[in-house]
Image (cartoon, rainbow, N blue to C red):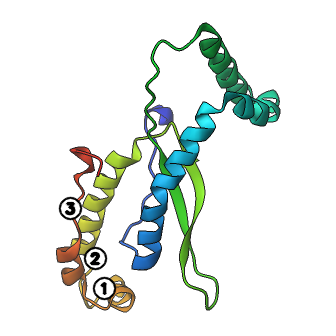
Amino acid sequence: ADPSFATQCPVAMLPFKIPAKAFHDAVDLSPLWNELVDAVARDLPWLYATLEVAASADPFTGRLLQISKAVHAEGLRQKIMLGIHRSDYMLHEPGNETPRFLQVELNTIASSMASHSANTRTLHHFMLGRYGVEDSPIGKSIREQFGVNGDELLRSLPENPTLEHVP
């Protein structure tokens, strides 16, 4: 079979506990990131100047820049823009400092993660049900990480409605 027909999305095999404050800080900052991305996308002279070096080294970026310039030279027929953004974060826990998320990537094209996140919830549910039994090594690890047994964690997994709507 041709391996290009399917690619695996990176997932966590078991849920990972994150600090609530770090999570809420990231959520609170997301509208500001979206406004920044929107402002950059609308500042064409700055965007073109910034991307010129990358465009000369990367044919894909170069082609995107050519397309953008051609479209804007003709004039936009539709003035309304929609941005679908996905930010990727890593939890930063330096020594005695408060844990916080650091953004490692902002995707303005890839919007498929909403559907993948619903699958991740299903995977977590399956893995906890199968391997989260208290006397297993994974069950013991869950108890150490979350302070509850696998059955309790399984019951507390939130629903993920992203296949119906993006919250």
Q: Quadrant of residue 80?
A: top left
Mark 3 lies on a secondary structure that is loop
Q: Nearer the viewer, residue 141 or 62?
A: 62
Residue at image mark 3: 159
Q: Amino acid at mark 3?
A: Glu
Dot 3 or dot 2, earlier in sequence: 2
Residues packed near mark 3 inside 10 Å, few (<14), some (14 to 19) or many (20 plus): few
The extreme top residue here reads: 74
The location of residue 76, given as percent across then percent down, is: 53, 14
Q: Amino acid at mark 2?
A: Tyr
Q: Quadrant of the N terminus?
A: top left
Q: Nearer the viewer, residue 26 or 15?
A: 26
Q: Is residue 17 visible?
A: no
The location of residue 12, given as percent across then percent down, is: 42, 65
Residue at image mark 2: 131
Judge depth for marks 3 and 2 and give the one in front. 3
Q: Amino acid at mark 1?
A: Gly
Q: Nearer the viewer, residue 70 or 112?
A: 70
The location of residue 95, given as percent across then percent down, is: 64, 89
Q: Residue at x 30, y 85 (%)?
A: 139
Query: Which numbered tag is attached to residue 139?
Result: 1
Whether residue 146 is situated above or below residue 63 in the rendered picture:
below
Task: Measure the alpha-carbon separation of dots 2 and 1.
Answer: 7 Å
Q: Residue at x 52, y 46 (%)?
A: 35
Residues packed near mark 2 inside 10 Å, few (<14), some (14 to 19) or many (20 plus): some
Q: Nearer the viewer, residue 144 or 21?
A: 21
Q: Quadrant of residue 78?
A: top left
